[in-house]
Amino acid sequence: MEKLLIEGGHTLRGTVRVSGAKNSAVALLPATILAEGEVTLEGLPDISDIEILNGLLEDIGGQVEQDGENITIDSSDMVSMPLPNGRVKQLRASYYFMGAMLGRFKKAVIGMPGGCNLGPRPIDQHIKGFEALGAQVTNEQGAIYLRADELIGTKIYLDVVSVGATINIMLAAVKAKGKTVIENAAKEPEIIDVATLLNSMGANIKGAGTDVIRIEGADQLTGCRHTIIPDRIEAGTYTIIAASKGDEVVIDNVIPIHLESLTAKLREMGVKIVAEDDRLIVSSDKTLSSVDIKTLVYPGFATDLQQPFTSLLTQATGTSIVTDTIYQARFKHVDELRRMNASIKVEGSSAVVTGPAPLQGAKVKASDLRAGASLVVAGLMANGVTEIVGVEHIDRGYEHLTDKLKNLGAKIWREDLEEEEIKQYQNS
């Protein structure tokens, strides 16, 4: 096990290239199950979640060949192998195997998904969609069993706007008989990305990116080639980092419209941002103004950027209120920021941040992926050295974080945890 060490206070400048979108990739890989042939995905991020998904695809008979950012999956010999535990427990996105395997094989056995501990995140809307299409869904000994004689298109209204449920129902419905309509669908760019792949495979999906998605069932899907969109959360995280300690930092390989809710707030704080076709140029102002944010479904402020943005707000003059309407448990980073001398208090689903606070390096723990990103932002701004344990969470979503920050001028490195530190981390 490793820890991440950051010597704060150094000015950052240069260019950082954003990787392919994690939240797309973890759905695109299971989607390849539906194609009876070879699918090549380009621009795959080099993160631990991808390794887990590749292993799951191989478990059910897929042929997986990866060459750097490109991966080819041949699903010709895949079978509906039960996946009750093991790798499935390591990430939440494993639930996309439910929709993909149900869509192709009309049956699946998938263990309850794992991933970051962000409180209750039920999959009831996924199950509602599967059942509406004609599947029988049961929970047996901690695994979800899905069975259907055939899937028939229907109208499905999502009670809660859910990215995961929208994608999972799309995966199940693309080969169903007749027409499926998903109402109150999520609009995230990652949904458009998955729909684009499926359409390239021969599906007939219209309306992705709107709140009504229409799917005409296809008899067969075939192989294709697809390039993954840039990761808007990684891009947003580096934009926040540039706002905290940057001097003309270029965020390359981005789709600026995907970040408008973030960049609008950063400009409100006094950060200078120039948006070009596929990059942002960010310069930090020495004086940042406080702002209030509320996380909302896309195109609102992304919950995945709330935690790193909260770290930035510790350096803004005045009081800021951060409200997370998506995951109330997403304030686990607050106690760690307090260890670094941040002035934050949590009141229900909001955090009140008072700044500017002189952050001090400390020993802190990343409880989940985006909490880890928030501690990296704080460590770059703090005086002294910050030690972050729980690096495995960060590695789930940020490709080559250490190298990318070093190239911008950050003083950041990794060290192996000593035996006593491992015991403390495991018991904390």
Image (cartoon, rainbow, N blue to C red):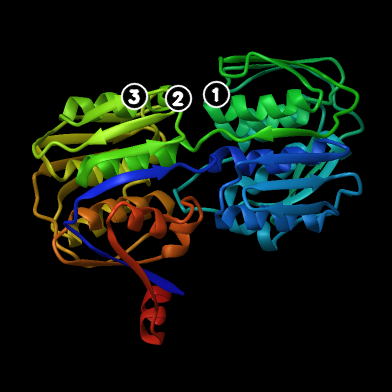
- Residue at the image position 85 percent from the left and 27 percent from the top: 151
Drawn side of residue 1 relative to residue 84, left or right? left
Amino acid type at circle 2 is: Tyr
Pointer 1 and pointer 2: residues touching (CB < 8 Å)?
A: yes
Q: Which residue is mark 3?
A: 275
Q: Which residue is mark 1?
A: 186
- Please tell me which residue lies in front, 253 or 367: 253
* First in sequence: mark 3 vs mark 2: 3
- Please tell me which residue lies in front, 228 or 95: 228
Residue 216 in sight in this render: yes
* First in sequence: mark 1 vs mark 3: 1
Residue 363: quadrant of the picture: bottom left
- Please tell me which residue lies in front, 21 or 164: 21
Residue 407 image point, x, y percent: 35, 54
The extreme bottom residue here reads 419
Element at label 3: strand
Element at label 1: loop
Residue 322: quadrant of the picture: top left
Where 35 falls versus 134 (above or below)? Answer: below
Amino acid type at circle 3 is: Ala
- Residue at the image position 87 percent from the left and 20 percent from the top: 177
CA separation in Å, label 1 and label 3:
26 Å
Q: Residues within 10 Å of mark 3 (few under 14, many from 20)?
A: some
* First in sequence: mark 1 vs mark 2: 1
Drawn side of residue 49 relative to residue 12, left or right? right
Which numbered disc covers residue 298?
Answer: 2
